[in-house]
Image (cartoon, helix red, strand yellow):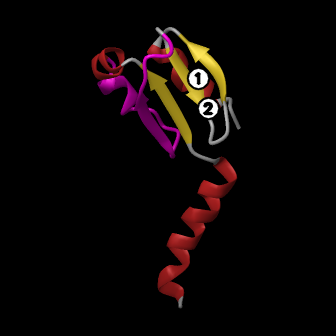
């Protein structure tokens, strides 16, 4: 059915790009919320944790980058794939 093609295309794109999770302290995430919502990477989620003082960029299996600045997060996400 052609009505499902956009959904399937989005899911195939999501499978290829993979979700990215930005982890950080709750206070840090809430102060940078306006910048984090502007991130152009399509499948980004935020997760509050007490593991790190900065931001941790994670995939589905493991974390692969750290950033102290919210502007650096956008760059790391765009270069992750």
Residue 74: % across, % down = 53, 25
Q: Residues within 10 Å of mark 1 (few under 14, many from 20)?
A: few
- CB-based contact (under 8 Å), mark 1 and mark 2: yes
Residue 73: % across, % down = 53, 21
Per the image, the residue denoted by label 2 is 78
- Which element carries disc 2, helix, strand or loop? helix
Judging depth in this view, the residue of 2 and 66 nearest the camera is: 66
Judging depth in this view, the residue of 70 and 59 nearest the camera is: 59
Q: CA distance from mark 1 to mark 2?
A: 5 Å
Q: Residues within 10 Å of mark 2 (few under 14, many from 20)?
A: few
Residue shown at 69%/53% (left/top)? 16
Q: Is residue 27 above or below residue 11?
A: above
Per the image, the residue denoted by label 1 is 75
Q: Is residue 78 left or right of residue 24?
A: right
Read off the magenta span: 32-52
Q: Is residue 75 above or below residue 14?
A: above
Residue shown at 58%/26% (left/top)? 57
Residue shown at 47%/84% (left/top)? 3
Number of labels in the image equals: 2
> Quick one: which residue is furthest to the bottom in this view?
1
In the picture, residue 76 is in which quadrant?
top right
Residue 53: % across, % down = 46, 8
Which quadrant, please, contains the C terminus? top right
Magenta residue check for 35 = yes
Q: Is residue 73 above or below residue 3?
A: above
């Amino acid at each position: 059915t052609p009505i499902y093609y956009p959904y399937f295309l989005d899911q195939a794109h999501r499978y290829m790009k993979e979700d990215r999770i930005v982890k950080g302290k709750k206070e840090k995430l809430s102060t940078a919320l306006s910048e984090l919502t502007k991130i152009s990477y399509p499948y980004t989620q935020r997760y509050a944790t007490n593991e790190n003082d900065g931001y941790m960029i994670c995939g589905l299996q493991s974390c692969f980058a750290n950033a102290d600045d919210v502007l650096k997060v956008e760059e790391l996400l765009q270069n992750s794939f």
